[in-house]
Amino acid sequence: MVLLSDNDILIMLAQCNLIDEALSVFQCTLSDCYVVGAAPYSLYLNDPQKCYDKRLGNHSAFDRLTGLVDSCHKLGEADENIDLLEALSRIDGVDDGELELFMHADSMHRGRHPYILTTGDKRSLRALLSSNCTLSFPSLFQRVECLESLLLKAISLYGHAHITNKVGAGYATTTKQDRFDQVLRIAFGANRDEATTRQALNHYMQDVAYFIRL
């Protein structure tokens, strides 16, 4: 198992203290997890105040985020696939971090290695679908966990109340609230029962369902 993860998922897991629950969903340990090499810098982990201002919005979650990133392996260069690299580079909406993850997923797919790609950036997945960049489809088909799919699986494992409490505590301690994911605020808001939460989470990921791991 190799878990390739982007910054958005790392931030959410740290804010809501859901790292252990996520590892249970993935049936892996942190030793199986990889992040892009630039993650410590793009998350500003060398500057706690800047990390708070620009990424995390939660002082109490900083140590969790740092521990998570430090415990993950860092991705190096992906095996070369010039055709895919050129195709992805032409797509508006695929940023450098997601491009790197997509290239590694392609490399793992061609090498027939087990892997999951996790991303909180559905914009890049929508851009892939609308671009019809079919070169990337085989390596991502049912290989992706987005924020919503991860939480749905966590609810099935731990129960709605447990995950709601974790998300609620994360929101309460995120004092820069514009850094807290809007989907979480909607899906786990006041008086949301399990059916309502599941409906909201499914709604927000339905347009990228092609890629989502079953």
Image (spheres, helix red, strand yellow):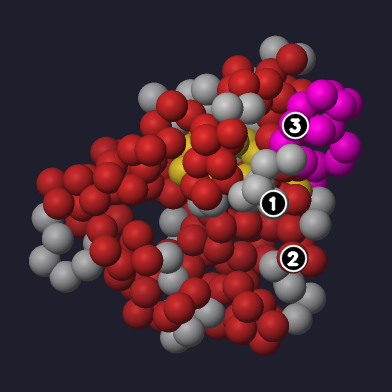
Specify the amino acid type for callout 2: Ser
Real-space CA distance between mark 2 and mark 3, rounded to the nearest whole angstrom: 24 Å
Which residue is located at x 14 percent, y 51 percent? 196
Task: Verify whether residue 100 appears in magenta.
Answer: no
Q: Position of residue 72 (x, y in %)?
A: 71, 48
Could you tell me which secondary element the residue under label 3 belongs to? Answer: helix
Label drawn at residue 187: none
Answer few, some or many: residues within 10 Å of disc 2's Cα (few below 14, many 20 plus, some between 14 and 19): some
Which residue is located at x 37 percent, y 74 percent? 171
Could one spot residue 160 in this view of the protein?
no
> Is 123 left or right of 87, judged from the image as shown?
left
Task: Verify whether residue 74 appears in magenta.
Answer: yes
Specify the amino acid type for callout 1: Asp
Could you tell me which secondary element the residue under label 1 belongs to? Answer: loop
Looking at the image, tell me whether mark 2 or mark 3 is earlier in sequence order.
Answer: 2
Q: Which residue is mark 1?
A: 95
Observer-side mark, 1 or 3, equals 3
Real-space CA distance between mark 2 and mark 1, rounded to the nearest whole angstrom: 13 Å
Which residue is located at x 59 percent, y 34 percent? 131
Which residue is located at x 48 percent, y 84 percent? 176
- Between 34 and 133, the residue placed more toward the observer is 133
Label drawn at residue 42: 2
Q: Which residue is mark 3?
A: 87
Real-space CA distance between mark 1 and mark 3, rounded to the nearest whole angstrom: 13 Å
Observer-side mark, 2 or 3, equals 3
> Is 70 left or right of 129, judged from the image as shown?
right
